[in-house]
């Protein structure tokens, strides 16, 4: 069968895989971009997409950590001066109109 030849073929990228593994053992936090540059420094001529594919096939991908985004809030804290709360929930007055205040329901 035609597919049997594929299984018996020798891996032509084995030397490259060994070098990628050696780089990865020296530098645990290197991704495929840095590995590609390191291979280039060592004299290899390999496409970065090929290096990325080999790193994925070998299971050497660095776990990526997503950014933690904060929900937008326009709140700037307390702005301006806050008047002193003089009534302190004491609504009963000894003299009429002594404790007059304004609320969302009107004057009280």
Image (tube, rainbow, N blue to C red):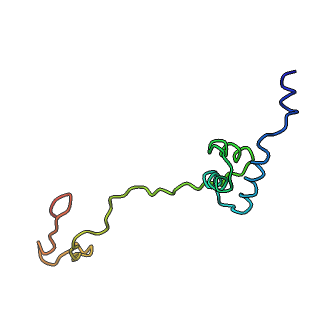
> Which image quarter holds the C terminus?
bottom left
Question: For residue 88, what is the image quadrant?
Answer: bottom left
Residue 80 locus on image (x, y percent)? 22, 71
Residue at the extreme front: 43
Q: Residue at x 76, y 43 (%)?
A: 13
Please name whichever residue, 58 or 38, is drawn nearer the observer in this view of the structure. 38
Residue 89 locus on image (x, y percent)? 27, 73
**Up/down of 105 relative to 79, above or below:** above
Q: Residue at x 83, y 30 (%)?
A: 6
> Which image quarter holds the N terminus?
top right
**Up/down of 7 relative to 86, above or below:** above
Q: Residue at x 78, y 48 (%)?
A: 15
Please name whichever residue, 57 or 83, is drawn nearer the observer in this view of the structure. 57
Q: Residue at x 21, y 73 (%)?
A: 81
Please name whichever residue, 58 or 69, is drawn nearer the observer in this view of the structure. 58
Please name whichever residue, 35 or 70, is drawn nearer the observer in this view of the structure. 35
Question: For residue 63, what is the image quadrant?
Answer: bottom right
Residue 54 locus on image (x, y percent)? 71, 44
């Amino acid at each position: 069968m035609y597919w049997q030849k594929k299984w018996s073929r020798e891996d032509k990228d084995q030397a490259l895989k060994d070098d990628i593994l050696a780089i990865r053992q020296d530098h645990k936090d290197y991704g495929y971009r840095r590995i590609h540059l390191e291979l280039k420094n060592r004299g290899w001529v390999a496409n970065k997409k090929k290096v990325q594919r080999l790193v994925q096939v070998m299971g050497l991908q660095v776990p990526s950590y997503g950014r933690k985004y904060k929900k937008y809030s326009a709140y700037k804290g307390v702005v301006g001066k806050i008047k002193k709360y003089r009534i302190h929930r004491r609504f009963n007055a000894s003299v009429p109109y002594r404790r007059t205040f304004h609320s969302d329901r009107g004057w009280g």
